[in-house]
Image (tube, grey):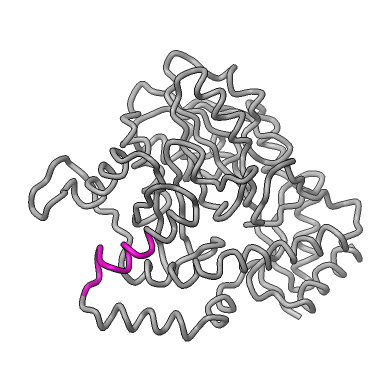
Amino acid sequence: MKIWANRLDRAFERHQEEYERAALRVLRSGWYVLGKEVDNFEQSFAKYVGAKFCVGLASGLDALWMAFRMLKIGAGDEVIVQANAYIACVMGITMSGATPIFVEPNEYFNLDVTKIEKAVTAKTKAILAVHLYGQSSDMLAINEIAKKHGLYVVEDCAQSHGAKQGETMTGNFGDIGCFSFYPSKNLGAFGDAGCVTVNSDKLNDDFRTYRNYGSEKRYYNKVVGTNSRLDELQAAFLAVRLKYLNEINAERTKICNRYLAEIKNSAVTFPKIQENCETVWHQFVVQLGNRNEREKFINYLAEKEIGTIIHYPIPPHLSEAYAYLGYKKEDFPIAEKYADSVLSLPLYSGMTDDELSYVIEAINAY
């Protein structure tokens, strides 16, 4: 039996007729950019998250760098971010000219709130909270720190569609929530897509103007903006998938609960769930002892035709892209330990009980 680390075809096949109807509706409409489909999805997703506004964009990375641009954070400013985040989070900061200030993650793979205040300086303008692997960061504590120091809060919700802390959904805690709808996300499009969620009328207007060449009215350009528009086709697909998002998240939870209950192997360390948080299990990330042990485990599973993915093997501060920041190995030992030990097990919509049992049995036999 061959098990992919992730597969997207089954999620499509489950609601294939609806997706195809949506595609034909858009194709036959003759309107393909910033039309009724985008309006409908923006309103539906804002309502789902609990935010006042949603603004559709071309990608999650655009959502991030535009967020800092709209907050007027740039050269000479600092933004606090966890050291084990995906590199796009850091690119969102540096593309606006600001400097990332790394903080170690906690045992839940998210920003360690006990270390934030030590990183705050006179140049700090914002905290970027990344809800990694589907679990909310401790937003209550982060917001309290931000309020104390007069900082903005930007949420990277690329992996947390539907995740909550208490009764509040991610994307509705900070000043701006940034979402990616890359196809592999819980709420995935069929190509690149993203959005921001905001509760500010001004930010809503600013994003809408900036995403469309800085224009509120065609050919009348208010600012030097960009071209980052969620297209009608992707919006139509996302509206279909949004109807089933709670069902998709419940399915992923069921799969991960079986992993937690049935894997019996001391070589594997399970992910932890923070109290008062509802994860949506974007990934099921286990830890092996070190890089060598992980490699042996990966090779063993590969022999069984079980795919795995490392999220992520190189922390941003050690990447070639950010060598200019001057960090070196051991500067953030917890983040580096995660990079050497984490491994994502197979997890996707439509994963069968037999496939799941096969993975569990293989791990238990390791």
> Which residue is located at x 60 percent, y 64 percent?
246
> Which residue is located at x 66 percent, y 56 percent?
281
Quarter assignment of residue 190: bottom left
In the rendered view, would you say 296 is above or below 17?
above
**Residue 36 magenta-highlighted:** yes
Taking the image as shown, residue 221 lies to the left or right of residue 73, namely: left
Which residue is more in the foreground, 260 or 168? 168
Percent from the top left, x then y, of residue 189?
45, 67
Magenta stretch? Answer: 31-42
> Which residue is located at x 74 percent, y 65 percent?
254
Query: Considering the image in quadrants, where does the C terminus appear?
Result: bottom right
Taking the image as shown, residue 74 lies to the left or right of residue 175, namely: left
In the rendered view, would you say 113 is above or below 258?
above
Percent from the top left, x then y, of residue 148?
52, 18
In the rendered view, would you say 39 is above or below 105?
below
Percent from the top left, x then y, of residue 69?
32, 36
Which residue is more in the foreground, 188 or 200? 200
Query: Considering the image in quadrants, where does the N terminus appear?
Result: bottom right
Q: Residue furthest top?
A: 122
Percent from the top left, x then y, of residue 348?
64, 68
